[in-house]
Amino acid sequence: MMARVSHLTAFLVLLAAAIIPQPCAAQGQARRLILKDGSYQLATKWETKGDRIRYFSAERYEWEDVPNELVDWVATNQYEKDRVAGKTSPAAVALDKELEAERRQEELKSPHVAAGLRLPSEGGVYALDTYLGRPQLLPLNQSAGAINRNTAHNALRAAVNPVSGARHTIEVPGTSAKVQVHAALPAIYINLDSPTGPDDDAPPSTSAQLPWDRFRIVRAQVKGDKRIVGATKIAVYGKVSQEQDSVPASAEQLSEGWIKLTPKSPLEPGEYAIAEMLGKQGMNSYVWEFGVHADAPANLAAINPENSDKPSQPVELQKQEQPGPH
C-alpha cells in the first residue's frame, strides 16, 4: 500500500511540473524583439497585426503589442540569426552591454519599495504584497482592457454621464479579480501622468491636468456575477455626484511621478478596486481591480526582488490624507 502511495505521489509531482509554467525554461527559449530606442522585449513568438507587432512576453506570460515602426528589424533579425547559429557576434555583445547599462540607469531612477525591489520605469499601477514572507509587486490591470508594460502610462478613461436625475452603477464582470493580494495592508503605487492616447474614450482632460491625489481605494460589492465599484448621478440642476465605498487611505507623492496609496487600517477579505476621480467628468468607469485574501494562491505575474544592494527609501514630496467613505 505504501509503495502504491509513493508511486502516486511521484506521478502527481511530475504532472505538476509539466503543467506549471517554468520561467527559467521560458527565458531560455526567449527571442529578442529589439526596438529602435535600443531596448528590447523578451518574447517567445510574435506576429504582425496591421501596423502593430503582437508578441508573447517571456517575462509576463501574456500577449502584448508594440507599433511596427518602433521595431528595429535589422537588429532583431541579425540577433536571431546569430542565436540560431549558436554564436555571439561582437555587435550582439556590445548591444548587451549597452542595453544593460541603460537598463541599470533607468532602474536607478525608480523608487525602491522593498529590499531588491524597484518600481518599473515604465509606470503603471502595482500593489506591494507579501507572499510566504517575501515582498512582491503585483501589476494591476484595468478592467475591460489590460494595459501592457509598453503603454502602462496610457490609462483607459471613460466618464459615466447618465441622463439628468438618473443613477448609473459602475460594474466589473466576474465575482473576483484575477490578482489577489495576500497582505492586509498593501501599498498601491500609481504612475499614469501622461496624456491619454488618441484612441482612448476619454474626457478632454489629461492626467497632467488632473489632481495627483485623485485615486481612491474602493470596496467592491459582489452582486450576482459582477462587482459594483461605484455609481454616478447627475442632479436635475446639473451637479455630478459619485457614490462609492471608499477606504480611508493616505496618499503620497514619490519621485519619478509615482504616487503611493496606503489604507489607514487593514483591509478585510474581499474585492477592491483603484478608482480614478475625473473631477467634473465624474468617476472613471475603468478601474484597477484586485482582491484581498490571505489564503489565495500565488500570483503568476508577480515581480520578485532581485539580489541587489540595500535599497534607498522613496523620496516623499507631498503627503495628503484622503477622505473616508462618503
Image (cartoon, grey):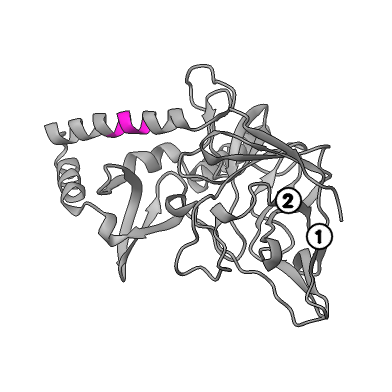
Residue drawn at x 82%, y 61% is 221
105 over 320 or under it: above or below: above
Front-most of residues 198 and 98: 198
Asked if the residue at tag 2 contacts the one at tag 1, i.e. Cβ–Cβ closer than 8 Å, the answer is yes
Q: Classify residue 309 as left or right of residue 185.
A: left
**Residue 310 screen position, x and y as percent:** 53, 17
For the magenta stretch, what is the residue range?
A: 99-103
**Residue 67 screen position, x and y as percent:** 33, 60
Residue drawn at x 45%, y 54% is 151
Residue drawn at x 42%, y 57% is 64
Front-most of residues 182 and 261: 261
124 over 65 or under it: above or below: above
> Magenta stretch containing residue 284, yes or no?
no
Q: Main secondary structure of the magenta part?
A: helix
Front-most of residues 221 and 293: 221
Inspect this view and state whether residue 229 appears.
yes
Helix, strand or loop at label 2? It is: strand
Tell me if mark 1 has few (under 14), some (14-19) or many (20+) residues whose alpha carbon lies within 10 angstroms of its own.
many
Q: Amino acid at mark 1?
A: Gln
Q: CA distance from mark 1 to mark 2?
A: 9 Å
Label of residue 216 in the image: 2
Q: Classify residue 187 as left or right of residue 155.
A: right
223 over 165 or under it: above or below: above
Where is residue 191, by image quadrant?
top right
Residue at mark 1? 244
Inspect this view and state whether residue 1 appears.
no
